[in-house]
């Protein structure tokens, strides 16, 4: 599951530096069929691209 020290949510494909956050994302994605903004904003992808308008 680990890729270059990152953890990927298998549901949405976003990567996280924290395994616990990745697990939270996976649980949320499975339950609600979508991502939580509060969680995805912590993803590596969001961190690199900065804030979304
Ligand atoms: Zn997810």
Image (cartoon, rainbow, N blue to C red):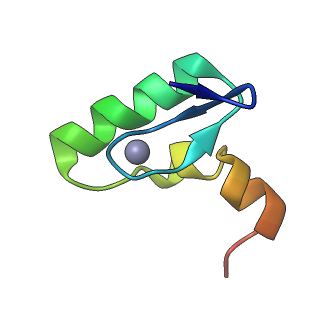
- Residue 36 location in percent, x, y? 42, 49
- Residue 25 location in percent, x, y? 42, 36
| Vertical arrangement, residue 42 with respect to residue 53, above or below | above
Q: Is residue 20 left or right of residue 26?
A: right
| Quadrant that contains the C terminus | bottom right
Can see residue 50?
A: no
**Residue found at x 60% / y 43%:** 15
| Vertical arrangement, residue 43 with respect to residue 21, above or below | below
- Residue 47 location in percent, x, y? 78, 55
Q: Is residue 26 left or right of residue 49?
A: left
Q: Nearer the viewer, residue 33 or 10?
A: 10
When asked about the image quadrant of residue 46, the answer is bottom right
- Residue 21 location in percent, x, y? 55, 27
Q: Quadrant of ligand 1?
A: top left
**Residue found at x 32% / y 45%:** 11
Q: Nearer the viewer, residue 48 or 38?
A: 48
**Residue found at x 51% / y 30%:** 22
Q: Residue farthest to the bottom? A: 53
């Amino acid at each position: 599951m680990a890729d270059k020290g990152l953890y990927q949510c298998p549901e949405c494909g976003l990567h996280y530096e924290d395994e616990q956050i990745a697990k939270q994302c996976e649980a949320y994605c499975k339950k609600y069929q979508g991502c939580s903004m509060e969680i995805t904003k912590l993803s590596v992808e969001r961190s690199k691209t900065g804030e979304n308008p």
